[in-house]
Amino acid sequence: MFQIGARADPSTNNPESFAAILFFELADGSRIEVAKVDNAEHDEGEIHLDRFYRETGADIKDFEVPISNLWEAEDHLNEHARTYGQTYLKNHGKGLRDEG
């Protein structure tokens, strides 16, 4: 089962920083991130999608997303959860993404 979690600082009403995360949980309680939208600063821009579901070696950061806030990030992940989740399982199985 895939789930979406979110964090916002200092609050969800007026977040300065945020992340919405699509993940699934293993039997041992560990969480595997499938995709994340956040506004952590990077050279290319701010709000972006981390596509952990992509194949190892593929570029995982997408700065061309039509998302401007936490709520749009959550909606985006909810809308694409099935596709992202199935792609993650196809590429990585039920384990951590191999960065090697």
Image (spheres, grey):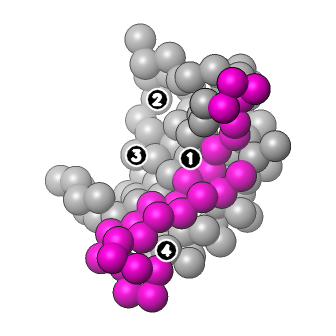
- Residue 16 vs 41, above or below: the answer is below
Q: In this rendered view, identify the residue nearer to me: 59 or 33.
A: 33
x, y percentage for residue 79? 73, 64
Q: Which mark, residue 35? A: 1
Residue 59 in sight in this render: yes
Which residue: 75% across, 26% down?
A: 27
- Residue 57 vs 10, above or below: the answer is above
In the image, what residue type sits under mark 4? Answer: Leu
N-terminal-most mark, 4 or 3: 3
In the image, what residue type sits under mark 2? Answer: Ala
x, y percentage for residue 16? 30, 76
x, y percentage for residue 50? 46, 47
Whole-number angstrom distance, CA of label 1 to CA of label 2: 14 Å
Q: Secondary structure beneath disc 4?
A: helix
Read off the residue under disc 2: 58
Read off the residue under disc 3: 61
Q: Nearer the viewer, mark 2 or mark 4?
A: 4
Q: Quadrant of residue 87?
A: top right
Label 3 Cα crowd, 10 Å radius (few <14 / some 14-19 / many 20+): some
x, y percentage for residue 48? 40, 59
